[in-house]
């Protein structure tokens, strides 16, 4: 059985391992207009990963963790928040850059993300911590990198050399941001293309969009125009919300 | 009309664009003994930028934002603080590394700063977040880098390659620090010279001093003794508090 | 008189300078089952350094600072915590990456650590800040690097070039972690070996263990099998808790 990777829009993914274990990353579902799947639709969740505290990444992690009594791998600030929300401490695996854990049979390594992680609780409490990217190993030869909204940084080359991810889920778009005057997301399409290159990926899947937008299209064009015979270049794969990528490709 | 850049001491600058828009960066004025301009002297402020939460960088941002109803581009912790102080949320543009915004007709890109950002409110609340440098584009061919007290890091080379700043405002001095036993600031003069080189600047303006001190002098000597014909080296320009740099130079 | 470096297990060290000044780093003693020395055994402490807020690094800093009225060099979050615990502000030297201080005749430079620093107080207050590594110069030609649980990052090469540490205290092990499903610490033995190489050390002392474990053994084997004639390689020195390294070696 291959590994399956389903996209829910923005940065939300469900990984299904070859033996049926289900992992959610950045499970922003109910308020995510792009997601065809809502928390009530979920039938099985074995592990939840949260890259950082932001409404569109923390998403429904708390609700889903409670419903499925699923463990959550996250940073210190998200852990403190979920503790306060009543999640049992033994379900909360707070880690940071460098640390590798094995939970629900899945290996997860935390790697640097050059971003932020912070929240203001309903009672006004402000909390921040280090944001993370993940290298998830759902099956022996599958190493999926999730960028967690990172900006571009040169040590992505080191991440590529040390952990050899074959699939990358990388933010390429400013995404849906309401009334904000944002011109770029954390990586421009060009920077995301550099990231894919530096990580030495086989496949890159663009993220952080609801509908395919100009940034996503610019990224795909850029990736398709970068070739370096005889070595094939990183292959860009577009997933629209709801679509699934199967690895190895069939 | 050229772009104008006025120094107020420490890291405080006023940028005046060719069409008269006024941008304040790290507006530490009233308690800044070096600044010839106080908040009461300001006649026009269109945009306020804050690199990080520190008394000598956050400065009078809150007071000025209220007086001029000016938008503030800042990090998450500064945003949470200003919200609490009564600034309207629509005036607070919280961003992080990688993100570019256009506010008041001026483009601002947040770039990494290897520093800290934290504060303790009067009520004892502690808050921290990611500190920033900025690439400010007040006019089409003018890209001003403000280091925001960063320590030296190699990805300044990447910042230089990607965003090609032509003017850099870089902390070179330990500055006025009262009774603290500090021997260096966040960059020594030599490290600041490396930063100017790595960023590929045309002009570097040393910052983080009230009066010209030994660190500033060491930095200027170092910059003037670094030449690499036929390419001219980064040109160091000393501004004393109150002085203005005009770009292009006249 | 040479410089002495005594290991207490995990990341706790006591440095004794040639003139008898005593510096504690990450003084986790009383709850540290590996440490043969408890706070009640200490006779003299002139300076306390804390790399980051974590139970096994902040350790007994507060208790020891009160007992000896010793200054504490630490980050912003640790400083805020110790202020709240009643340590006098003039004893708390909060610094960040890049800054060098001289306290009790000892030079201490803060350098980046790619880790976290956070705590939850008894009253539920959450606090975070930038974690640090240190370059400690207890005697003129002795520069000791303490990694403070950093993950591997390429700018350790820059730290090596700029500050030329001759002795490195580097976390190589996941250490004693109770019921957590951790497979690695912040650096694997291989990553710690790269760190020692990149820092250009003369000596590396593995840390973050209570008893010598498989990670420590893997690190020592790796270091001993890395040679590059004619230049001698970094020399790995194993200290068990309670043991002392004398520099220069006698």
Image: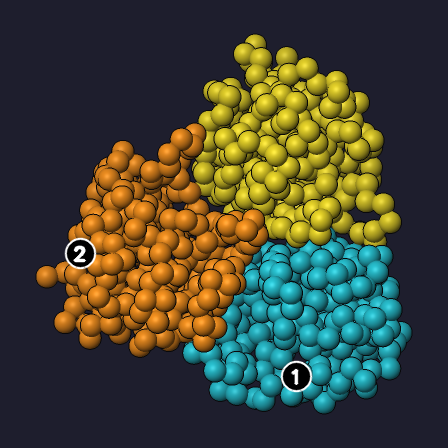
Chain colours: A orange, B yellow, C cyan
Is A226 positioned to the left or the right of C62 in the image? left
User: Considering the numbered disc 1 on the image, is that residue within a helix, a strand or a loop?
Assistant: loop
Residue extending farthest top: B1
The residue depicted at 20 percent of the width and 46 percent of the height is: A240
Q: Which residue is mark 2?
A: A244
**Residue C153 in the image: x percent, y percent?**
52, 60
Q: Secondary structure at mark 2?
A: strand
Placement of the C terminus of chain C among the 4 image quadrants: bottom right
Q: Measured from the top left, where is residue B194 in percent x and y?
A: 62, 43
Mark 1 crowdedness (10 Å alpha carbons): few <14, some 14-19, many ≥20: some
- Regarding residue C227, the answer to whether it shows in the image is no
Q: Position of residue C242 (x, y in %)?
A: 71, 88
Please give the chain letter of the residue carrying mark 1. C
Total marks in image = 2
* Residue B231 found in image quarter: top right
Residue ID at (78%, 82%): C39
Q: Residue furthest left?
A: A250
Q: Chain of mark 2?
A: A
Quadrant position of the N terminus of chain C in the picture: bottom right
C100, C167: nearer the viewer: C100
In the figure, is residue A129 to the left or right of A109? right
Label 1: which residue? C32
Tell me the residue at 81%/41% (across/down): B176
Mark pair 2, 1: CA separation: 49 Å
Q: Nearer the viewer, residue B84 or B22?
A: B84
Disc sitting over residue A86 in the figure:
none
Q: Can residue B61 be spotted in the picture?
A: yes
Residue depicted at x 84% and y 60%: C88
10 Å crowding of disc 2: few (<14), some (14-19), many (20+): some
């Amino acid at each position: 059985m291959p590994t399956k990777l389903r996209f829910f829009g923005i940065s939300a993914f469900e990984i299904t391992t070859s033996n049926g274990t289900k992992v959610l990353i950045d499970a922003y579902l109910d308020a995510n207009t792009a997601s065809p799947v809502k928390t009530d639709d979920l039938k099985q969740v074995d592990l939840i990963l949260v890259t950082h505290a932001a409404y569109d990444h923390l998403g429904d992690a708390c609700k889903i963790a409670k419903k499925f009594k699923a463990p959550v791998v996250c940073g210190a600030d998200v852990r403190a928040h979920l503790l306060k929300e009543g999640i049992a401490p033994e379900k909360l695996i707070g880690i940071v850059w460098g640390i590798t854990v094995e939970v629900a049979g899945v290996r997860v390594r935390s790697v640097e993300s050059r971003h932020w992680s912070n929240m203001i609780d309903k009672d006004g409490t402000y909390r921040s911590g280090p944001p993370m990217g993940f290298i998830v190993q759902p099956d022996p030869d599958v190493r999926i990198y999730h960028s967690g909204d990172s900006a571009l940084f040169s040590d992505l080359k080191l991440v590529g050399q040390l952990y050899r991810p074959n699939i990358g889920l990388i933010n390429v778009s400013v995404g849906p941001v309401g009334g904000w005057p944002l011109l770029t997301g954390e990586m421009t399409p060009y920077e995301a293309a550099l990231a894919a290159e530096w990580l030495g990926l086989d496949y890159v899947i663009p993220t952080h969009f609801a509908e395919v937008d100009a940034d996503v299209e610019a990224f795909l064009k850029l990736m398709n125009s970068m070739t370096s015979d005889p070595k094939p270049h990183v292959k860009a794969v577009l997933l629209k919300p709801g679509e699934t990528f199967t690895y190895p490709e069939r």
